[in-house]
Amino acid sequence: MTSAWDPQRYQGGHSYVWKFGAGLLELLGPQPGERILDLGCGTGQLTAEIAKSGAQVLGIDKSEEMLREARQNYPELTFVQGDATAMRFKDPFDAVFSNAALHWVKDADRAAESIAFALRPGGRFIAEFGGKGNIASVEAALRDLFGADAAKRSPWFYPSIAEYAPLLERYGLEVRQASLFDRPTPLEGEHGFEDWLHMFCAGYLRALDESGEKKIPEIAARLRPALYRDGVWTVDYRRLRVVAVKQNA
């Protein structure tokens, strides 16, 4: 399944994606002169924050639509199109940073290998993305509606710490910190959940059923009792945060 991202919708109603990245930036602690790769940079907001430190930052994303917006937002920065599973750069980076992106990469083993290849010995990998149990209520509703295909054809990878740490360590990335935690995330507006489904699930729903995207109001109605309280939709996010360091060969 391929996803066509809508940068305007992403920036207009889903700014929490990069705003929640502020704490992750503190863990990164970028320093002047460092080479840093922002993996899954989206429309570039966190790339720009890293650049403010004086680091030399490169943003990479698979979506040309998102990159086009990032280049328009921050013409002074460099953004390239690329796949997390196939990154090969001539010069290594001091750090690879990734916020809210790696749960879209089903081939996590190749991504870990690619991330390790991008780092110098002693370089650090700082990431946060959807972890085990993320949007569990949404996935349950999709299984009820679409059957076994919903799980089999899911575009997401939501690992536990026990699943993810060995992938990194297989490629010489020593895990120094790892945490899995709940982050209930409020959405904007009365129709915030339907907009969330359009933003993050539309391609997946079309792949499950030609009319899948038309079922968004039905999915919202099913989940309203669980996710809608006091006029606000809140999605049951769970995040996995990881800090790892590349060991000497």
Image (cartoon, grey):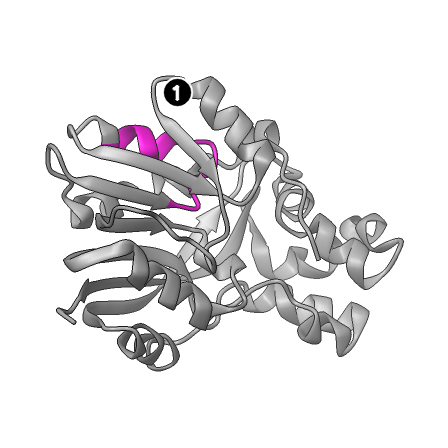
Question: In the rendered view, would you say 87 is above or below 148?
Answer: above
Residue 184 seen in this snapshot? yes
Residue 63 in magenta stretch: no
Question: Would you say 143 lies left or right of 77 here?
Answer: right
Q: Position of residue 45 (x, y in %)?
A: 37, 30
Q: Position of residue 216 (x, y in %)?
A: 77, 50
Residue 47 in magenta stretch: yes
Q: Position of residue 208 (x, y in %)?
A: 80, 63
Of residues 51 and 213, the one nearer the viewer is: 51
Question: In the rendered view, would you say 124 is above or below 20?
Answer: below
Residue at 57%, 64% (x, y): give it.
156
> In terms of secondary structure, where does tag 1 sit?
loop
Image quadrant occupied by the C terminus: bottom left
Residue 218 seen in this snapshot? no
Residue at 34%, 43% (x, y): give it.
38
Q: Quadrant of residue 146?
A: bottom right
Residue at image mark 1:
74
Q: How many marks?
A: 1
Residue at 45%, 36% (x, y): give it.
80
Of residues 193 and 31, the one nearer the viewer is: 31
Magenta stretch? 39-50
Q: Quadrant of residue 117?
A: bottom left
Residue at 34%, 56% (x, y): give it.
128
Of residues 137 and 110, the one nearer the viewer is: 110
Q: Amino acid at mark 1?
A: Tyr
Question: Would you say 4 lies left or right of 72 here?
Answer: right
Image quadrant occupied by the N terminus: bottom right
Mark 1: give few (<14), some (14-19) or many (20+) Cα within 10 Å.
Answer: some
